Image (tube, rainbow, N blue to C red):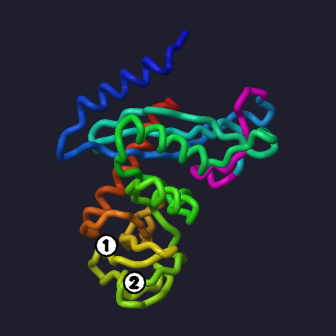
Amino acid sequence: DVNIDKITERLLSRIRKYQTTSNRGRIIVDFTRLAKSKDAQTPLTTWDRDGRLNGINNGFSAGFCVWTNGFITIPLSFCFWLNRKDSGDEFVSKKDLVKDMIISTSKKLGNLEVLVDGEFSTMEMLEFFAVACINFTARIACNRKVTSTDGTMAQLKLHPLLRLNRNQISRTMAAYFGGRIYEFTAVRHKTRNGKKKIVFIISTITRSSKEHVRIYVLRWNIEKFFRTSKQ
């Protein structure tokens, strides 16, 4: 029989070995899809959106919580999500599953900074992070309306303090959103098809725009983990 507790403790022991005073690491939480055939009757499969294919398919919707120091990535916990039709009265939202994984991991490793995708930068999640006193960095929608410390209210994509000059890669400002102050960063981003666009990052931590970008890029370590685990 597989002893999950023993495996988890060995993983935690390995993480503590790699943690240093200057780099305790960060937690990344995200979901991935593993598509199955339409006729598959495999347990825990469900219909869900597949962001990679930009469509809906049947398969596993698995959530993972991993630790990374930027060089090494170690998985700690996972869960499966089922849509309302498949889960019935036992339905649990992805946000609640993410909250559970974050709280569980924080109890084991302490309150490390959490990196999440834009799907989890909703007001519900921001409230959760604030109440739990957990720092986070996440992508956020460009149409979110914020108020900078000089009193200017505008959508992120239209805010003058986040307007990038021709050769500027990123820019950060402090602003109020939902009654709390955060750091918002605009950054030039190259998409998979090579096109450039400006995306936005929200964080509870004060640092330079370059550092905000560097930290958020660490989130791609979980994408590398997904690709490796699917092979």
Q: Write the residue at 36% across / 84% down.
A: 149
Residue at x 22% of width, y 45% of height: 23
Q: Amino acid at mark 1?
A: Ser
Amino acid carrying mark 2 in the image? Ser
Q: Earlier in the sequence, mark 1 or mark 2?
A: 2
Q: Which residue is mark 1?
A: 170
Q: Which mark is residue 148?
A: 2
Q: Residue at x 54, y 77 (%)?
A: 143
147 lies left or right of 43: left
- Which residue occupies the extreme bottom position in the image? 151
Residue depicted at x 53% and y 76%: 144
Magenta residues span 41-55
Above or below: residue 78 compared with residue 161: above
Magenta-drawn stretch contains 99 = no
SS state under label 2: strand
View extreme (front): residue: 131
Residue 62 lies left or right of residue 28; in this view the side is: right
The residues bearing labels 1 and 2 have C-alpha atoms spaced at a distance of: 17 Å
Query: In this rendering, is residue 88 above or below 201?
Result: above
Q: Nearer the viewer, mark 1 or mark 2?
A: 2
The quadrant holding residue 174 is: bottom left
- Up/down of 210 relative to 69, above or below: below
At numbered mark 1, what does the secondary structure look like: helix, strand or loop? strand
Q: Which mark is residue 29?
A: none
Residue 175: horizontal and vertical position, in percent?
40, 78
